[in-house]
Image: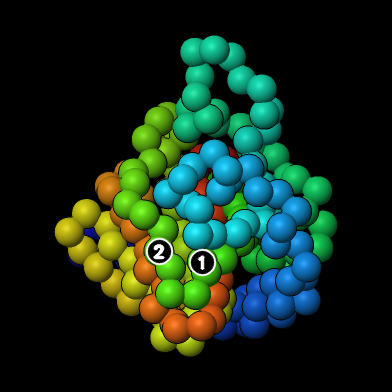
Amino acid sequence: MKNFSLMQLPWWPQAFADIQAEITYNDILWDIDRRRQNSNRKLMNTGAIIMRHRADEKFPDHETADDMMETADTLLVNPFPKTMTHLKRIAEELNAKLGRAFFERIAPSSVVYPYAHLGTYYEKHKRFYMVTQSPLGTYMRSGNEEVLMKPGELWWVNTREKHDTENRSGDTSATHLIFDLQLGTARQ
């Protein structure tokens, strides 16, 4: 497969348990920030808890949101100390710099419609997904490939290709941790 890679980290099962506990405990945070869904109709069936985002919401006229390279913690990072510790550990082990990071919730029996990530930011960052909740797993397509991502699995996904996600878990939302790494960069 050229658009997906299942990551194998020996310490990831404990990370999954910690991350799952934090997102469950902080369930009330889903409707605090809706800018992601409001700015992209393809994400209308989702909710998000954004922990790391663009460092400056106001950007020069020549840059789009997808060209903004710098990221920073949001106020919503504070309820997720273990999640952030695990993300920083992955970044360190892969000699990478942590970019954007957020939880995404897809409504029951819903989809994230096909789109591709373009721009300088996505040329330099790789996107990773972990299903934290989805009884039947989450189906994801990138290009002409499809995988079933199961809870606890950590996947690299080529989101520069047109990609979409489908929650086939009936009346249950699917929840993912999504984060970006700029590989081959010194930690800052």
Can residue 34 be seen by looking at this rendering?
yes
User: Residue 129, how many percent across, how many down?
Assistant: 47, 63
Disc 2 and disc 1 in contact, CB within 8 angstroms: yes
Residue at x 67%, y 29% (from the top left corner) = 57
Q: In this view, does 22 lie above or below 40?
A: below
Q: Name the residue under label 2.
A: 111
Identify residue type, mark 1: Ile
Can residue 11 be seen by looking at this rendering?
no
Where residue 106 is drawn, which disc sits there?
A: 1
Of mark 2 and mark 1, the one earlier in the sequence is 1
Pick the residue in front: 79 or 90. Answer: 79
Considering the numbered disc 1 on the image, is that residue within a helix, a strand or a loop?
strand
User: Residue 160, how many percent across, how many down?
Assistant: 32, 44
Where residue 59 is drawn, which disc sits there?
A: none
Pick the residue in front: 75 or 13. Answer: 75
Identify residue type, mark 2: Val
Q: Is residue 111 above or below residue 38?
A: below
Pick the residue in front: 143 or 35. Answer: 35
Rendering quarter of residue 91: bottom right
Rendering quarter of residue 56: top right
Rendering quarter of residue 155: bottom left
Residue at x 48%, y 52% (from the top left corner) = 43
Q: In this view, does 184 lie above or below 61?
A: below
Residue at x 27%, y 47% (from the top left corner) = 161
* Residue positioned most to the left: 144
